[in-house]
Amino acid sequence: MTIRKGEDFSEWYNEAVLKADLVDFASTKGFMFIKPYGYAIWENIQKALDGRLKEMGHKNAYAPAVIPEKLLSKEAEHVKGFAPECFYITHSGNRKLHEKLVLRPTSETIIYESYAKWVRSWRDLPLLLNYWNSVFRAEIKMTKLFLRTCEFLWQEGHTVHETGEKADKEVMDILGIYRWLVEEWLAIPVVAGRKSENEKFAGALYTTALEALMPDGRALQMGTSHNLGTNFSKAFGITFLDREEKKQYAWQTSWGVSTRMIGALVMVHGDDKGLVLPPKIAPVQSVIVPIVFEKEKEGVLEEARKLHAKLAKRFRVELDDREGYTAGWKFNHWELKGVPVRIEIGPKDIKNKQVVFARRDTGEKVQIKMENIENELDKLLEKMQKDMFARAKRFLNENIVTAKNFEECRKAIENRKIVRVEWGNDPKAEEEIKEKTGATIRIIPFDEKPSGKCFYTGKKAEVIAYFAKAY
């Protein structure tokens, strides 16, 4: 790493994700190539989340990536929200198509046309399907690897329910699972709540979300869960006969998280040496680096291989026995890639029946007896996971400030804070604040209530709102 995190955060981030071998720019402007190490992080995210969704009764499916324009246009608010971001297909070979096709910016419309055929009775409900795919959005001018690219990976859930109450429960259950994933696995604390009317998903009744704070003072949306009401079911004819044989429009939800979480991992935990990955999500939890001198070389390598075979039964562990690289070079290489624990083993360690553990997050080193190595590594990885979350939680708490008037709010936003205010819930005033500060309402928290007047209009406050600049 040649750029310090505290001096040029944006360039530090680009250097970190590229040099750690997570991703590369593709030849098509605005697109990225996710390399094996970066994809391995995504696979660990998938594995954790997919298991929880299946426990809830969701099943995976796949829908086409190409949507006829007429379908996208069926829900007016939805098409208005996504039209500026769409890629259109106009030709097949040299032939012009009779109707333009759209590369999916999200899959509601193509999926719901099929749901209208599949749902007939209350006995068909709930319909709980999840989709692992990629989506396409024309972000060519604002590309930032993992955070804003023209194609990115995500999962999108699309469910159908009998009643609004059941849809509400689905929305909150999913948001809870997302919070578990982000906080327990990625060690990133979040604030949870609803989006404002201006910021909600296009076509939704309401949107709930998780927001995290990045070190540059910008908020990053980590996951969303939407109650779509009956807006889409009315547009696409998703009806069912209820328990009294009466025709009803179905209630629907949609929800998703994406590979932008990998960007958040880098930003929240990384340092001037590169990535720092939480043990639960790290592709490699520990790397064994033999300290080799020519005289004892074969003996050290033999012991290192035995140690690798032993630890590989319980952990994701690598043995770096490559020729032609010094131990110091290997230390830097694995630190850049954020591997949680480095295990050093040399002639003296073998003689003393021990190894050295080096923590990536703190740099702390400790000698561990070989007979205790599995349990000690397990304990250290668990402690690191908790410590990393605690550090990030302190940062979040220290950077949420309360403002009583607009001037306090403006100054706090300039100082890269999340600003907590009592808010009158006025969409027009929200737009004015965005124009003046560049900040938007990121969250209206579920469990906080106002007690006074709106910080901006002076009228009676209806909710608490968190303002911040966002990615």
Image: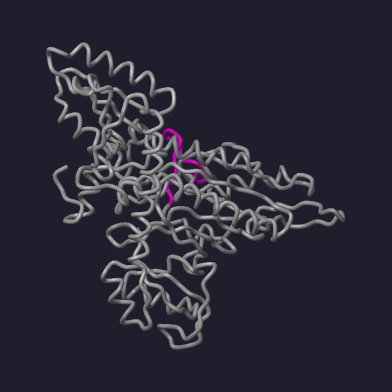
Relative placement, left or right, of 378 versus 341 is right
Residue 237: image x %, image y %?
Answer: 70, 53
Which span of residues is magenta-colored?
86-101
Where residue 9 sits, quadrant-wise, is bottom left
Which is the main secondary structure of the residues drawn in magenta?
strand
Counting the numbered discs, the total is 0
Residue 324 part of the magenta-drawn span: no
Relative placement, left or right, of 166 versus 357 is right
Foreground of the two, 331 or 98 = 331
Foreground of the two, 140 or 461 = 461
Residue 360: image x %, image y %?
Answer: 27, 40
Residue 301: image x %, image y %?
Answer: 24, 15
Where residue 219 sits, quadrant-wise, is bottom left
Residue most extreme to the bottom:
458
Foreground of the two, 115 or 46 = 46
Relative placement, left or right, of 387 versus 6 is right
